[in-house]
Image: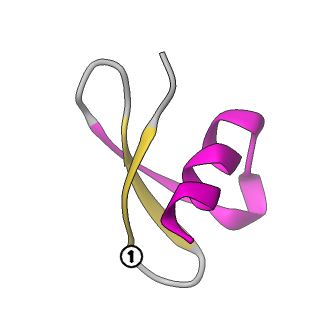
Amino acid sequence: KMSQCVRSVSNRLITCVNSQKRLVQFDHSRLTKHTEKCAILEK
C-alpha cells in the first residue's frame, strides 16, 4: 500500500501513483510518512 514515486513535477510537487494506480500530487510542505518515502525515492 506504499506509494511509488513517478517523477517530481517541480521543487514543491511530487507525482506519485498510489495502490489504486491513481496519480496523486503531493506538496513538500504537507509531507507525511507516506509521501516522504515517495520524495526519497525520487532522489
Does the magenta portion include 33? Answer: yes
- Magenta span: chief secondary structure: helix
| Residue drawn at (50%, 65%) of the image | 42
Vertically, is 9 above or below 19?
A: below
Residue 18, position in %: x, y?
A: 38, 30
Relative to 19, does residue 16 appear above or below in the rendering? below
Q: Residue at x 25, y 33 (%)?
A: 22
Q: Mark 1 sits on what residue? A: 9
State the image quarter where residue 7 is shown. Answer: bottom left
Q: Is residue 34 left or right of residue 16?
A: right
Q: Name which residue lies at 60% across and 59% down.
A: 39
Find the residue positioned furthest to the bottom: 11
Disc count in the image? 1
Q: Which of the pair 8/13 is nearer the observer?
A: 8
Q: Image quadrant of residue 19?
A: top left
Q: Position of residue 29 (x, y in %)?
A: 76, 64
Dot 1: element: loop
Q: Amino acid at mark 1?
A: Val
Looking at the picture, does residue 32 appear above or below residue 1? below
Q: Position of residue 13 (x, y in %)?
A: 51, 69
Q: Quadrant of residue 6?
A: bottom left
Which class describes the residues within 10 Å of circle 1: few (<14), some (14-19), or many (20+)? few
User: Which residue, as the protein is rendered here, is positioned at the far left?
Assistant: 21
Which residues are the magenta region?
23-43
The structure residue drawn at horizontal position 23% and vertical position 28%, both measured from the top left corner, is 21
Q: Is residue 40 magenta?
A: yes
Q: Quadrant of the C terminus?
A: bottom right
**10 left or right of 6 in image:** right
